Amino acid sequence: MSGSTDDIENLIALMAKLPGLGPRSARRAVLHLIRKRSMLLSPLADAMTQVAISARECLNCGNVGTSEICDLCQDDRRATGELCVVEDVADLWAMERAGVFKGRYHVLGGTLSALDAVGPEDLRIPQLADRVVSEEITEVILALNATVDGQTTAHYIADQLDGQVRLTSLAQGVPIGGELDYLDDGTISAALRARKDL
Amino acid sequence: MSGSTDDIENLIALMAKLPGLGPRSARRAVLHLIRKRSMLLSPLADAMTQVAISARECLNCGNVGTSEICDLCQDDRRATGELCVVEDVADLWAMERAGVFKGRYHVLGGTLSALDAVGPEDLRIPQLADRVVSEEITEVILALNATVDGQTTAHYIADQLDGQVRLTSLAQGVPIGGELDYLDDGTISAALRARKDL
């Protein structure tokens, strides 16, 4: 590659493929990077190269990390007998940010979908049954998204594990700080059905 | 750097510094990058390294490119005697996308600002006067933003070049496809003052 403006155009085209950036914001980001070459562009290039080399999926749970078995699966304090099933790594990170779950995770890598021909074998569902036995799991928490595919997947897993462990799912209701006026009807009716005595 | 999840956290922290990305969208972007390692992450790392090496400011106009004098300044067909003055490179790119201006550009690198102590010497204003003479410029188009600082800068430049060349600025009015209801009062009154006979 010799020095030409194609280098910059090429970078803009690649940046525009990131979720949340379009062609216009990619251009703005690249200009910002060029202005902050030593503070941001070079460190970012190095960090990306490093992650491209080191990032891998945990063989046990599907989390993203830099070793064959991720930090969470290696941590013995996490062997609480509770296993939280999530759709993808972003959901695992969201749970970890909440900081309230102390057990281990199982990342499915998606949801069952008849439309997209995603079956149980395409997800990490067979491994889930294995882990329930080998890690002596007593409770499986299904933290799947409240979408049709997410709930279909939850039902399928519940069928598979029925009788082997305690199965739970996240409570549905009004988000903290949520205003009723801005909530969809489904959430309001779920919150009403699950109403609690004060 | 040995393999640890710190690599990934470090990449997220750097990505979050890009304009248009926050901590949450940076995390999402990094997950996307890791999933598309060979298609996106590695090419992006290489493209950033390449741009970090090759990108430079054009010594003549301030445009960003990969040579000492940018492609626009090297193109003799651009020597039309028209010079378009813009605040920054993003504005130059916006003008080029419109594809209607065939002359050369002069990138100031900001606007005059008493508040931020930005004077003419901090911008590419002295070079502008030199270029008007050396490149036999006949018309300087002031394409500065319609902000207070932008207009102050335009007036300052107009004072400096008064009598030497024809000075023009972009027309103000209703944007194509713009709805009056969504326009600010200043734009509407400018459009009314500059109204044209049908």
Image (cartoon, coloured by chain):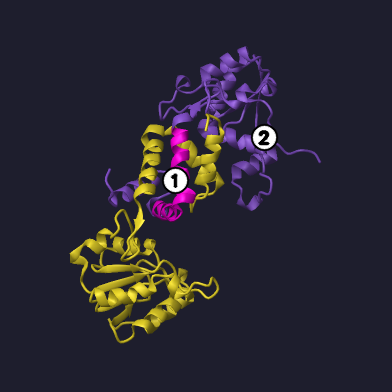
Chain colours: A purple, B yellow
Q: Which residue is mark 1?
A: A42
> Residue B33 appears in which quarter of the rendering?
top left
Residue type indicated by callout 1: Ser
- The secondary structure type at the circle numbered 1 is helix
Q: Magenta residues? A: A26-52
> Which residue is farthest top?
A134
Q: Quadrant of the C terminus of chain B?
A: bottom left
Instruction: Tell me if residue A147 can be seen.
Output: no
Point out which mark residue A171 bears. 2
In this picture, residue A33 sits left or right of residue B129: right
Residue A195 position in % (x across, y down):
73, 39
Residue occupying the point 18% across, 65% down: B76
Q: Are marks 2 and 1 on the same chain?
A: yes
Can you say whether B56 is above or below B92 in the image? above
Residue B96 location (% of width, % of height): 29, 62
Residue in the foreground of this view, choosing between B47 and A43: A43
Report the side of B164 relative to A138 (left or right).
left
Magenta stretch: dominant secondary structure: helix
Circle nearer the N terminus (2, 1):
1
Residue at image position (66%, 14%) is: A136
Q: Residue at x 48, y 30 (%)?
A: A55
What is the tally of numbered marks visible in this picture? Answer: 2
- The chain that hosts pointer 2 is A
Tell me the amino acid under the disc marked 2.
Answer: Ala
